[in-house]
Amino acid sequence: MTQLRIGAALFGAVLISVQVPGYAQVADIGKQEYSNSCAVCHGDNGKGAGPLAEFLNKKVPDLTMLAKNNSGLFSFDRVYWVIDGRQIVAAHGPRDMPVWGDRYKTDAAQRSFEFIDPKQLESFVRGRIIALIGYIYSLQVK
């Protein structure tokens, strides 16, 4: 739980840094993560109408409504748990499914990021997830 609080603090720092040079690069990482991992089901706009949505047994959630459906509060923790596999989402399959679960960790290891110390791999993965959450936050209906 402490790690999630740290993640939430980092997420807040990213949001506060909107005017800081380089923020666009962080936002681009989140958008790229979304395009690579989420858009196929949730759609480019996050409304749940991606090209594979019609083939799923359950309706794909509208990610633009997460805050609105939670009394106006964006739940960083819940979104984090869903992305990293702690919150089981039936449509995502088992946690070891390549599309979900520990995909980020496996992907980073397979790409052989030479600049990442194996001891820091978990931090790298958290950074990717936090960037993705930042992008999902940007999709929220105001």
Image (cartoon, grey):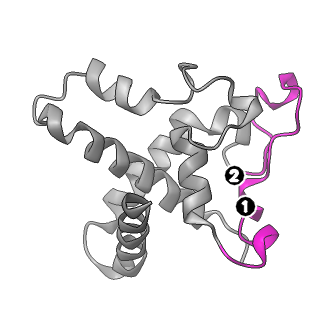
Query: Which stretch did the figure color magenta?
Result: 46-73
Few, some or many C-alpha atoms within 10 Å of disc 1 (few <14, some 14-19, many ≥20)? many
Q: In the image, residue 67 lies at what x, y percent?
A: 71, 70
Few, some or many C-alpha atoms within 10 Å of disc 2 (few <14, some 14-19, many ≥20)? some
Left or right: where 103 falls relative to 60: left
Q: In the image, residue 104 lies at what x, y percent?
A: 41, 32
Q: Is residue 54 magenta?
A: yes
Q: Is residue 95 magenta?
A: no
Q: Nearer the viewer, residue 7 or 140?
A: 7
Q: In which quadrant of the rendered view does residue 54 lie? A: top right
Q: How many marks?
A: 2
Left or right: where 101 falls relative to 112: right
Quarter the C terminus occupies: bottom right
Q: In the image, residue 47 lies at what x, y percent?
A: 77, 51
Q: Nearer the viewer, residue 126 or 3?
A: 3
The amino acid type found where label 2 is placed reads Asn
N-terminal label among 1 and 2: 2
Which mark is nearer the camera, 1 or 2? 1
Left or right: where 82 falls relative to 70: left
Q: Residue at 20% across / 22% down in the picture?
A: 112
Quarter the N terminus occupies: bottom left
The residue singled out by tag 2 in the image is: 45
Q: Secondary structure at mark 2?
A: loop
Pointer 1 with pointer 2, Cβ within 8 A: yes
Q: In which quadrant of the rendered view does residue 85 lie? A: top right
Q: Residue at 76% across / 31% down in the picture?
A: 90
Q: In the image, residue 119 lies at what x, y percent?
A: 16, 37
The residue singled out by tag 1 in the image is: 64
